[in-house]
Amino acid sequence: MRSFAAPAFLAAWWTALPILAAPPPRPWRPAKPPPTEMEVAAPLDPAKEPDRLHGCSLDFEGGPRGGLTVNDDQWILGGHLRVGFLCLGGFAFETVGLVGFGGNYLTLRPSLRVIYRLYSDTNRELELHPTLGWSLVQWFPVGHFSTWCERLEVDACWARDSGVELGGGMAYRFLGLDAVAGFGSLPSVTITLMATFPLGKTRW
């Protein structure tokens, strides 16, 4: 009997070992049904849409400019700052500040302009832009003429006026040429050669 007891015990232990070592069975859970066509075609939550769909990117540019005025016969130097609204195509605001030298006067001329840039290719290397703006001009007498104005107390020597500007320009890469006509007491034509460089971008 002892000769059969030992092999029987070993056989029972060997059979029960895999059962004891196996992990407990997992509880049964129903399978998740596949999404319906309505769920697949449902629009995205607006709160989770990327920010690029909202707001408008602002493009800042600026640079120096110089040229001449017809009628006042002056050389002019200054600069400009341009803010482009990329969400509105080529629409941009432009501020221009000019100082004029020549004749008996020194002139200061700030301007606020609206331009719309039209590009000839996708690389935006060649552009044409119509311009509409408003300008203020201040005349200061210089030299002997200033002495004469002060001696005779002629207030008209320090004149100031404003008017509308209308014109346009063209640019290739960063170099451009502008020509605007002035109305009222503004110089008849103002022609400037300019250089425009990127200054930065932000979101509004």
Image (cartoon, rainbow, N blue to C red):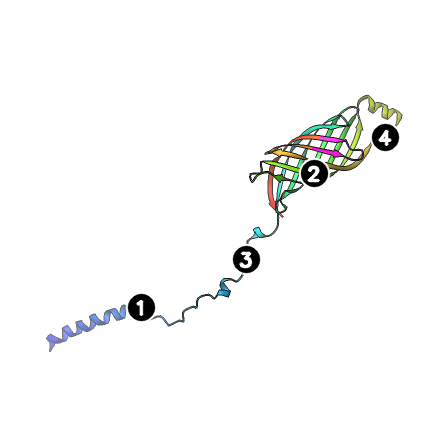
From the viewer's side, name the closer residue of 3 and 60.
Answer: 60
* Residue 158 as seen in the image, left or right of residue 7: right
Q: Position of residue 54 (x, y in %)?
A: 60, 52
Q: Position of residue 148 (x, y in %)?
A: 85, 23
- Indicate the amino acid at tag 4: Ala
Which disc, if any, is residue 131?
Answer: 2
Between marks 2 and 4 in the image, the one whose residue lies nearer the viewer: 2
Q: Residue at x 70, y 38 (%)?
A: 131
Which disc, if any, is residue 156?
Answer: 4
Q: Secondary structure at mark 2?
A: strand
- Indicate the amino acid at tag 2: Thr
- Indicate the amino acid at tag 3: Lys
Mark positioned earlier in the residue sequence (1 or 3): 1
Between marks 1 and 3 in the image, the one whose residue lies nearer the viewer: 3
Q: Secondary structure at mark 4?
A: helix
Q: Residue at x 75, y 28 (%)?
A: 70
* Residue 149 as seen in the image, left or right of residue 74: right
Q: Secondary structure at mark 3?
A: helix
The answer to whether 66 is drawn above or below residue 23 in the figure is above
Residue 23: quarter of image: bottom left
Of all residues, the one furthest to the top in this rendering is 144
